């Protein structure tokens, strides 16, 4: 029909802007909830900030804190206030010359005091200060009632004759005790450096150091046979052995090597009267 609008057969009019014009769409979707909206209170679970949770946790925390305080107080009482952990026994070991009574008397451990309060460093300092013969002492707690002292004494490697007594000198050059009788197997120092040209450069203390260096380097079998260590100067050290034998040592340098060389010479030439190890790599033997 001219000038009009004619609909095709079988094709109904439809509003293309409506929901039925969309492909594959069925019933309209429900509107979405706006962001930020909260679910009903009945659907929420109590969180950590919820008052109910705080009320339930309060008594538990209070009980835990009380238990910690009680345990700490009980532990402190056991350590300091009770009679269970107090000093009852004190023992000393490791002595060769000193007696246990001397060591325990110098230690002055407070018997009856709480074991945990005993100052082991102070005891160590007290023992070493009162007994110079002691090189070191290890003070330990022996739970539940004991204190143990493990002592290491100084060993003399050289003796200095003084009046009718002998001053003991260890391998570090420490003069630690004076005894009326010379210990067996420890050589006596004889210092004759007054006329030495090097006396101004090397005083008696330096020469004593050289003698100690030589004596401490002697192998034990040789040390037992050494009667004297004679020092005339820095590089003139002579050993006097048992049986009238002598050893030219030279200076204290390379004393360990010289000691090993002398030990080998004494085994190789046991009847020799004189040994020279002043040069360890070129020793000499005479009087055999």
Image (cartoon, rainbow, N blue to C red):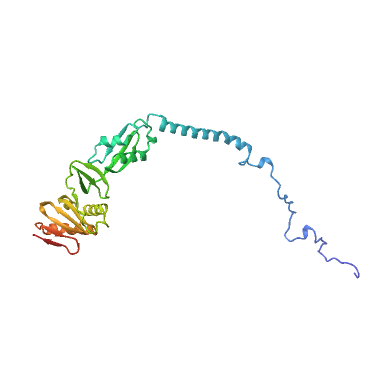
Q: Residue furthest right?
A: 3
What's the residue at 63%, 37% (across, down)?
51
What's the residue at 22%, 45% (across, down)?
167
What percent of the width, then of the height, locates residue 267?
Answer: 13, 57
What's the residue at 16%, 53% (across, down)?
222
Please state, as top left, top right, bottom left or bottom right, where the N terminus lies in the image.
bottom right
Quarter of the figure with residue 20? bottom right
Q: Total number of numbered labels?
A: 0
Please state, as top left, top right, bottom left or bottom right, where the C terminus lies in the image.
bottom left
What percent of the width, then of the height, locates residue 101?
Answer: 26, 34
Tell me: 135 left or right of 52. left
Tell me: 155 left or right of 84. left
Tell me: 88 left or right of 61. left
Quarter of the figure with residue 95? top left
Tell me: 3 left or right of 255. right
What percent of the width, then of the height, locates residue 25?
Answer: 73, 58
Quarter of the figure with residue 92? top left
């Amino acid at each position: 029909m001219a000038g009009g609008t004619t609909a095709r057969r079988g094709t109904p009019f439809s509003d293309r802007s409506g929901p039925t014009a969309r492909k594959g769409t069925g019933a309209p979707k429900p509107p979405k909830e706006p962001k930020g909206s909260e679910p009903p209170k009945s659907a929420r679970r109590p969180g950590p900030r919820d008052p109910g949770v705080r009320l339930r946790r309060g008594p538990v925390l209070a009980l835990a804190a009380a238990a910690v305080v009680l345990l700490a107080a009980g532990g402190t009482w056991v350590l300091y206030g009770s009679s269970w952990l107090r000093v009852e026994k004190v023992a000393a070991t490791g002595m060769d010359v000193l007696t246990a009574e001397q060591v325990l008397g110098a230690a002055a451990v407070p018997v009856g005091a709480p074991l945990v309060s005993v100052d082991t460093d102070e005891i160590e300092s007290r023992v070493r200060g009162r007994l110079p013969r002691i090189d070191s002492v290890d003070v330990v707690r022996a739970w539940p009632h004991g204190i143990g002292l493990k002592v290491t004494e100084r060993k003399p490697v050289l003796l200095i004759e003084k009046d009718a007594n002998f001053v003991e000198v260890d391998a570090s050059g420490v003069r630690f005790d004076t005894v009326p009788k010379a210990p067996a197997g420890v050589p006596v120092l004889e210092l004759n450096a007054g006329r030495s040209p090097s006396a101004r450069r090397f005083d008696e203390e330096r020469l004593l150091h050289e003698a100690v260096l030589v004596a401490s380097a002697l192998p034990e079998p040789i040390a037992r046979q050494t009667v004297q260590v004679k020092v005339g100067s820095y590089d003139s050290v002579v050993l006097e052995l048992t049986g009238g034998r002598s050893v030219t040592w030279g200076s204290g340098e390379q004393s360990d090597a010289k000691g090993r060389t002398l030990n080998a010479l004494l085994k190789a030439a046991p009847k020799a009267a004189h040994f020279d190890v002043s040069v360890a790599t070129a020793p000499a033997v005479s009087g055999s």
